[in-house]
Image (cartoon, rainbow, N blue to C red):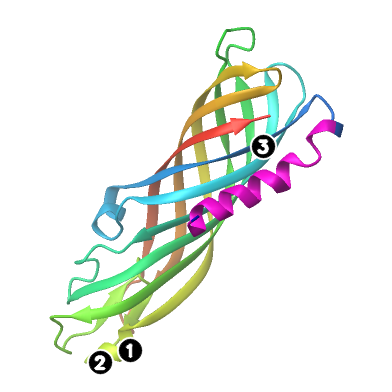
Amino acid sequence: MNHRALVLAALTLALAAPVAAIDERLDLRVGGGAVVPTGAATDRFDTGWQLTGGVGWAFDQTLGLRIDYGYSDAQLEDNALSEGFVNGSHVVHSLEASVKWTLTPDGPAPIYLLGGLGLYRQVNAITKVSDYEPGPPICSPWLEVCAGGPVPADQILGSRTSTDPGLVLAAGVEVPIRGRVRFVMEVRWRLVRSDAYGLPGQATSRAWGSYFPLTLAVRF
């Protein structure tokens, strides 16, 4: 069993253990899928994978609250750094709090919308640099690299971490399976506001990361 399956199994066991004793208004969810970058993020990150788990609380048939944790991993694009080709990864730990509005609570497969805020722990790791000659300054808010030139390759290598705010919007459908158990298909749009970077004497710039996490999950 690979590490992705182990993480998903652990999430399932952790969330499923108390399910028999919970209030009917409380639901648990585990799942996974792809994370598709959009906009300028497509020039820096490949499509990645994600695992997610969360808890929801229904105030009534239409309105509820969700708290979701997610782990995602994507590879860097070869040309993510214009000065040279790089290898590495973009890992994100996400914690999102959203309001859930069910549009068709009495339908055979209820459709819902989500909107909320998130906090994102981003880890950008550059493990290899090739076809690079130290020269002009480098400043990439996306990879959290910003230094006056000439910049040696070993100064580009390494892992850099930031914790950034963002917002999330989503739409999904829940297909009943049996009793409380439902199969969930969901697409989220996530916008992350990263730190600003700039070289001395120059204006700063900021990376706005835009992504579509696509999730298949089980809700119970």
Would residue 182 be visible to someone looking at this image? yes
Q: Does the image show residue 22?
A: no
Label 1 and label 2: CA atoms lie apart by 5 Å
Measured from the top left, where is residue 17 in percent x and y? Answer: 78, 42
For this rendering, which residue is in front, 3 or 213?
Answer: 3
Does label 3 or label 1 sit earlier along the sequence? 3
Residue linked to disc 3: 66
Q: Is mark 3 on a helix, strand or loop?
A: strand
Amino acid type at image mark 2: Pro
Question: Eyeballing the image, is 84 above or below 48?
Answer: below
Q: State yes or no: residue 84 in magenta.
A: no
Label 1–label 2 contact, CB within 8 A: yes
Asked if residue 106 is positioned above or below residue 117 in the image, the reply reads above
Left/right of residue 209 with respect to residue 176 in the rendered view: left
Tell me if mark 1 has few (under 14), some (14-19) or many (20+) residues whose alpha carbon lies within 10 angstroms of its own: few
**Dominant secondary structure, magenta:** helix
Q: What residue type is labelled 3?
A: Arg
Q: Is residue 21 left or right of residue 77?
A: right
Relative to 46, residue 181 above or below: above
Highlighted magenta segment, given as a residue range? 2-20
Question: Which amino acid, mark 1?
Answer: Gln
Asked if residue 52 lies left or right of residue 87, the reply is: right
Q: Residue at x 59, y 32 (%)?
A: 218
* Residue 155, label in figure: 1
Residue 107: x, y in percent?
A: 58, 7
Q: Check if mark 3's residue and mark 1's residue have beta carbons within 8 Å.
A: no
Q: Nearer the viewer, residue 140 or 170?
A: 170
Q: Provide the residue designation for mark 2.
A: 152
The quadrant where residue 30 appears: top right
Residue 162 position in % (x across, y down): 51, 69
Q: For marks 2 and 3, give the CA distance.
A: 46 Å
